[in-house]
Amino acid sequence: MHVIDMADFADGGLIREKSFIEQVEALDMSVFSGDEVFIKGCAQMPIPTWAFMMLASRVAQVADMITFGEESAPFVVFERASTTAN
């Protein structure tokens, strides 16, 4: 499982749109291909909804599952549908 910490995107203690977009666009999404990704929230600063949605939508293009929240109680926000028929 890969962990993305939203606090790593902070610029001066805040998520700022321009720098956040630049950092997300610079991420090598191939490392998340076919894997579970946990997007860790941050209690020390507010995380704008648009920032989480932007990051999750990019990761969802390659990951099989995305969870969000605290490590002790993550919840699933995206799970790729199985391509195999039962």
Image (cartoon, helix red, strand yellow):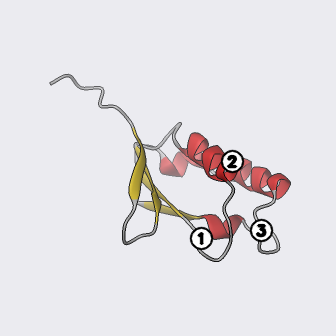
- At horizontal 49% and vertical 50% (from top left) the residue drawn is 32
Toward the viewer: 47 or 5?
Answer: 47
Q: Amino acid at mark 3?
A: Leu
Name the element at disc 3: loop
The residue identified by callout 2 is 50
Q: Quadrant of residue 75?
A: bottom left
- Discs 1, 3 touching: Cβ within 8 Å: no
The residue identified by callout 1 is 42
13 lies above or below 29: below
Where residue 58 sits in the image (x, y, percent)? Answer: 60, 42
Where residue 56 sits in the image (x, y, percent)? Answer: 56, 46
The residue identified by callout 3 is 14
Name the element at disc 2: helix
Question: Position of 45 compared to 42: left or right?
Answer: right
- At horizontal 64% and vertical 77% (from top left) the residue drawn is 44
Q: Quadrant of residue 64?
A: top left
Name the element at disc 1: loop
Q: Of the residues under marks 1 and 3, which one precedes in the sequence? A: 3
Q: Residue furthest bottom?
A: 44
- At horizontal 77% and vertical 50% (from top left) the residue drawn is 21
- Discs 2, 3 touching: Cβ within 8 Å: no
Q: Quadrant of the N terminus?
A: bottom left
Where residue 27 sits in the image (x, y, percent)? Answer: 66, 52
Question: Position of 85 compared to 35: left or right?
Answer: left
Q: Of the residues under marks 1 and 2, which one precedes in the sequence? A: 1
